[in-house]
Image (cartoon, rainbow, N blue to C red):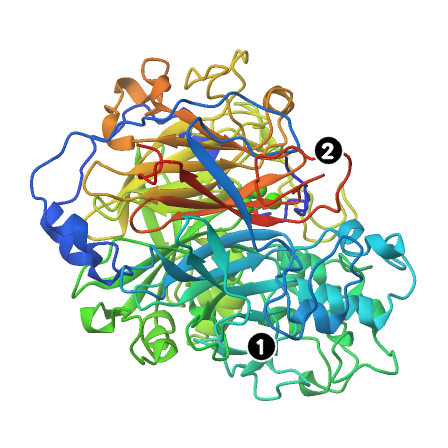
């Protein structure tokens, strides 16, 4: 169930044609052009040992079929999995990572120190990094995002947070909350009995929190935009925040993505263009962290930095630029725990996540990313450096992975997507000399110097507006089929989409809402976002053209309640879903992977039947449908099957399987009354202090999951 932590205002005042108008006019779908398998096989050698098994086969296989018995919708304080499967709770919030944190118990009073040495709160995106010789099927390092917090659960023993909504927050409560955010790294191991456990005192266990010192990399690093009192040179910042979905690189690093970070900062006056465009507030941050500023124990403006109102003579004397050190994709070397680096070349916005494209030796490395807010955009980063397979991760060997990260992620071109109604699309480069849709140079249109790429990145969203990008229905997770290179992305919902024929409405300076510059309140439907007041969402798919600046797209599936009149994919009680969010492509070879879909639903038509869920479909088994219908349509919808259901109140998010596919890992975020036991399927009897947790789903017979 959606917790609605997002900022519901719409900040895109660009007037670009919204994606929904594009889909309505999208009549002919392009034929599916799957990539050559030889190329695909060669390309995947870097991906953590997963690819070897896939490289051998040359002939097109019969697609997999999903062999599990689909589960029914459920509304329980329990996880539901198919017959023949188990679900085990792992590393819930508060699990100690080393000897400096005491064991969890129901009445545990959390402290800054204890939280800094324990698993963080609200598990979200995650990925696995092998520690064994088996590509990580027996033992791996789990990198896990801790997106935000449940203050009621965090402060339950004292009856809730102090001064949550007004007044001064106590310094140690703020420090504890700061430490509950960020990223957890924890060593996991499969035991002889098939159950999984974390390794309590592993040297790999560590936290990156919203206080950890981090470096800036790429064009913004060292620029005037990011000088602060803490880092007058503009090279460092403290913390990563609202880490939502994840990503990973072929060289063995974790990418963690800063999503709803604007809500944590305020700026009372002297507001800048990007404060308005991104929606930084004026009054009180999400948890009021700035209110602890001036506490006698405060060090180096640890709380003051969340209020970016200028107070000093220049940027080196205050924190006016602090928020400009957030909004990035952050790279972590999970094996060494070195200082994390914010890769600014990938743009600054509410990054949901970051997904590597098909990897081809001698070609650039590509990453896809979406901005999760209403009527925002989809982006692609293309490295300047060509992929060298010698840079592929070699677990167990000493490598300077962050130096390799700098090579591929600090120099390159950031593009934004325009979806055309004819099923084509174009990637628009966000470079100073790019020609805007009204014929100007992008740097001039933004009022920047001719070589100011840093300025373009700080103002990524404005740049995308000027280039004519297509506003979308809240892009969430992406997934790439590494064999074909096809990219899937969830568009979770958009309550501010209006009917065909209506005009986009804007609320700029002095208009309907009392927030200058905040606007684009409603936008009419278009081709890839064709439904007004879109509560149920959809998933799109695209394929790159050879020159990598063009693509073909189509809608893969539309969410809906089974009894909705508007149910283009023909979903039934057995597979109805809404608000797709998490996504993972379980590659096994060409046409042979499972697309796993997770939901974060706030759509009543589905919510009254089931909690959030995990569904599975094998896209390679579906024929392209004629006439512009979604790939999943009433004629083949039974191929989409419900695999698992989460507990009451929760969102199901974060997903991967071990390389041998025998263990599928998911996260349960913000459960209402769960977990009751290590068995995730045991329904809670009475009331527990809720804890987000990772859940590992396995077959009782030890076979691969889903088939
Ligand atoms: Fe944190 Fe857009 O989900
Ligand atoms: Ca969420
Ligand atoms: Ca999400
Ligand atoms: Ca969501």
The disc at residue 225 is: 1
Identify the residue shown where x is 65% and y is 41%.
Answer: 506
Q: Going by the picture, which residue comes out furthest to the front?
A: 193
Hey, which residue is sitting farthest left in the picture?
59
Q: Which residue is drawn at 53% across and 28% down?
A: 578
Q: Nearer the viewer, residue 208 or 276?
A: 208
Judged left or right of residue 273, residue 542 is left
What residue is shown at x 42% (from left), y 76% (from top)? 451
Residue 196 vs 397, above or below: the answer is above
Dot 1 falls on a residue whose secondary structure is: helix
> What is the spatial separation of the Cα atoms under label 2 and label 1, in whole angstroms?
53 Å
Of the two numbered discs 2 and 1 in the rendering, the one whose residue sits closer to the viewer:
2
In the image, residue 651 above or below residue 194:
above
* Badge 1 residue CB within 8 Å of ligand 1: no
Q: Residue furthest right?
A: 167
Where's residue 51, x and y in %? Answer: 21, 54
Q: How crowded is mark 1: few (under 14 residues within 10 Å), some or many (20 or more)?
A: some
Quadrant in which the N terminus is drawn: top right
In which quadrant is the C terminus drawn? top left
Label 2: few (<14), some or many (≥20) within 10 Å?
few
């Amino acid at each position: 169930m959606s917790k609605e932590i997002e900022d519901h205002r719409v900040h895109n005042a660009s007037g670009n044609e919204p994606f929904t108008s594009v889909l309505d006019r999208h009549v002919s779908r392009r034929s599916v052009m799957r990539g050559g398998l030889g190329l695909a096989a060669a390309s995947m050698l870097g991906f953590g040992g997963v690819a070897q098994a896939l490289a051998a086969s040359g002939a097109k296989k019969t697609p997999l079929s999903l062999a599990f018995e689909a589960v029914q919708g459920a509304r329980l304080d329990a996880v539901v999995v198919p017959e023949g499967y188990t679900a085990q709770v792992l590393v819930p919030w508060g699990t100690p990572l080393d000897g400096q944190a005491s064991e969890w118990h129901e009445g545990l009073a959390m402290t800054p120190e204890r939280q800094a040495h324990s698993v963080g709160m609200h598990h979200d995106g995650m990925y696995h990094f092998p520690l064994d010789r088996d590509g990580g099927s027996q033992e791996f390092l789990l990198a896990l995002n801790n997106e935000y917090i449940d203050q009621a659960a965090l402060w339950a023993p004292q009856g809730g947070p102090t001064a949550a909504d007004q007044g001064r927050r106590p310094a140690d409560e703020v420090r504890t909350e700061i430490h509950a955010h960020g990223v957890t790294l924890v060593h996991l191991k499969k035991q002889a009995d098939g159950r999984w456990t974390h390794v309590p005192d592993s040297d790999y266990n560590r936290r990156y929190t919203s206080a950890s010192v981090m470096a800036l990399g790429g064009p913004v690093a060292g620029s005037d935009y990011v000088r602060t009192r803490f880092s007058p040179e503009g090279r460092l910042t403290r913390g990563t925040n609202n880490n939502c979905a994840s990503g990973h690189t072929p060289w063995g690093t974790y990418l963690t993505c800063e999503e709803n970070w604007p809500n944590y900062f305020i700026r009372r006056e002297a507001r800048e263009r990007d404060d308005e465009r991104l929606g930084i507030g004026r009054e009180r941050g999400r948890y009021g962290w700035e209110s602890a500023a001036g506490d006698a124990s405060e060090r180096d403006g640890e709380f003051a930095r969340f209020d970016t109102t200028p107070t000093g003579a220049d940027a080196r004397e205050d924190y006016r630029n602090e928020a400009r050190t957030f909004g990035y994709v952050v790279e972590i070397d999970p094996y060494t725990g070195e200082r994390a680096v914010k890769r600014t070349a990938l743009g600054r916005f509410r990054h949901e996540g970051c997904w590597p494209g098909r990897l081809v030796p001698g070609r650039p490395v590509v990453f896809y990313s979406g901005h999760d807010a209403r009527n925002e955009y989809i982006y692609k980063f293309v490295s300047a450096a060509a992929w060298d397979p010698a840079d592929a991760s070699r677990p167990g060997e000493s490598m300077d992975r962050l130096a390799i990260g700098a090579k591929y992620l600090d120099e390159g071109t950031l593009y934004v997507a325009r979806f055309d109604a004819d099923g084509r699309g174009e990637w628009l480069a966000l470079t100073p000399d790019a020609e805007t849709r009204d014929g100007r140079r992008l740097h001039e249109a933004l009022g920047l110097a001719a070589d100011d790429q840093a300025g373009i990145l700080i103002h990524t969203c404005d740049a995308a507006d000027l280039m004519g990008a297509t506003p979308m229905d809240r892009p969430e997770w992406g997934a790439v089929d590494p064999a074909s290179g096809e990219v899937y992305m969830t568009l979770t919902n958009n309550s501010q989409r209006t009917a065909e024929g209506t005009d986009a409405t804007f609320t700029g300076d002095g208009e309907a809402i009392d927030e200058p510059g905040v606007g684009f309140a409603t936008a009419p439907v278009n081709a890839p976002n064709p439904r007004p007041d879109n509560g149920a969402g959809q998933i799109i798919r695209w394929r790159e053209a050879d020159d990598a600046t063009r693509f073909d797209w189509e809608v893969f599936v539309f969410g809906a309640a089974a009894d909705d009149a508007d149910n283009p994919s023909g979903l039934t009680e057995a597979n109805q879903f809404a608000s797709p969010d998490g996504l993972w492509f379980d590659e096994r070879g060409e046409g042979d992977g499972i697309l796993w879909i997770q939901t974060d639903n706030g759509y009543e038509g589905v919510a009254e039947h089931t909690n959030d869920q995990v569904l599975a479909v094998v896209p390679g088994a579906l024929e392209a449908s004629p006439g512009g219908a979604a790939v999943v349509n009433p004629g083949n919808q039974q191929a989409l099957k419900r695999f698992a259901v989460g507990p009451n109140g929760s969102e199901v998010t974060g997903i991967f399987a071990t390389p041998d596919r025998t263990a599928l890992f998911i996260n349960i975020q913000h459960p209402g009354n769960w977990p009751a036991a290590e068995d995730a399927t045991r329904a809670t009897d009475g009331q527990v202090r809720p804890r987000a947790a990772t859940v590992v789903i396995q077959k009782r017979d030890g076979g691969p999951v889903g088939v």
